[in-house]
Image (cartoon, rainbow, N blue to C red):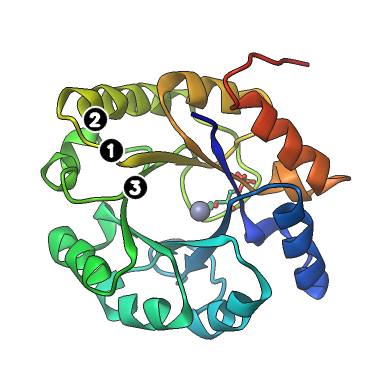
Amino acid sequence: MAGIIAPSILSADYTNLERDVKIVENAGAEYLHIDIMDGSFVPAISYGPNWVKQLRPETNMTLDVHMMVVHPENFIDQFADAGADIIGVHVEATPHIHRALQMIQNRGVKAEVVINPGTPVSAIQPVLDMVDQVLVMTVNPGFGGQKFLPSTLDKISQLNTYRTMNDLNFDIEVDGGINNETIRLAYEAGANVFVAGSYVYDKKDPAAKVAQLMKLTSGSVVTD
Ligand code: DX5
Ligand code: ZN
C-alpha cells in the first residue's frame, strides 16, 4: 500500500499560504498536517480553530489536526466545527484519553492518539481498538526542523505487530525529522502516513519533495 504524505503547514510561507497549500496538493499529497500549539503543552504558540476554518475551503486535502494542547477536550468541538477530518490528541495531555477520543468520534471525525518519544506503546494499548490513527512522534513536539530520533522506530514496529496480531486497521503516522532518508526507516518499520515540514518547504521545490517522498513509500525501493 502506498504511503500517505502529509506536508506540515507549520513550515510553509504564511504570506503565501494559499500557494503553498496548492503546490503540495497538486503534487499528490493527500493530507495537510496542521500543528496546534498552546504555549503550555509545548513551548510554542501557533494557530487556532478560526485559522483552520479559513483554510478549509482552500483545499480538498484531508485536514490532519495535531493538537499539542493541554485539556484537548476543551477544543475538540471547535476544531470539528472548523472542518478537521482527523483530530489527534496526546495521551500525555489529558487524564481522560478515552473520553477525548470518544468526543472526536462522536463528531464524525477520525480519532487519533499521539505519543511523545518518551512515552511507551503500552500507555495507549487500552485505546488501540478504538482509534483510526496512531501518531508516533519521532521528535519531541513543539518545533519544526528537528532531528529524527531513531529510538522511536521500535515503537512503530511494536504498533505494526500489535495491529496485525489483533486484526486492527489503524494507520500509523510519524511526525518529526522526516526526510528522504528517515522516511524509509519509518516505512520499513510499518508507518504508512508521513508528516514532513521543513524537508518539503524549507528549500526549493516543495512539489518535487512531495513526489520524492511518495516514491520512497510506494513499495518500489528508490534511493538517491
Ligand atoms: C513538531 C510538529 C511537526 C513539525 C514537523 O512539533 O508536530 O508536525 O511541523 O516538522 P519537521 O518535518 O520539520 O520535523
Ligand atoms: Zn505535528
The spot of residue 54 in percent (x, y) is: 61, 83
In this view of the protein, which residue sits in the foreground, 44 or 69?
69
Marks 1 and 2, the one that precedes in the sequence: 2
The image's mark for residue 133 is 3
Q: Is 54 placed above or below 182 here?
A: below
For numbered disc 2, what is the local secondary structure? Answer: helix
Label 1 residue near ligand 2, CB within 8 Å: no
Residues at circles 1 and 2 in contact by the CB criterion of under 8 Å: yes
In this rendering, would 191 be left or right of 145?
Answer: left
In this rendering, would 68 be left or right of 214?
Answer: left
In this view of the protein, which residue sits in the foreground, 110 or 122?
110
In whole angstroms, how far apart are the C-alphas of marks 1 and 2? 6 Å
The spot of residue 196 in percent (x, y) is: 62, 44
At 34% from the left and 79% from the top, the residue drawn is 75
At 30% from the left and 50% from the top, the residue drawn is 132
In whole angstroms, how far apart are the C-alphas of marks 2 and 3? 11 Å
Q: Is 156 placed above or below 115 here?
A: above
The spot of residue 16 in percent (x, y) is: 82, 71
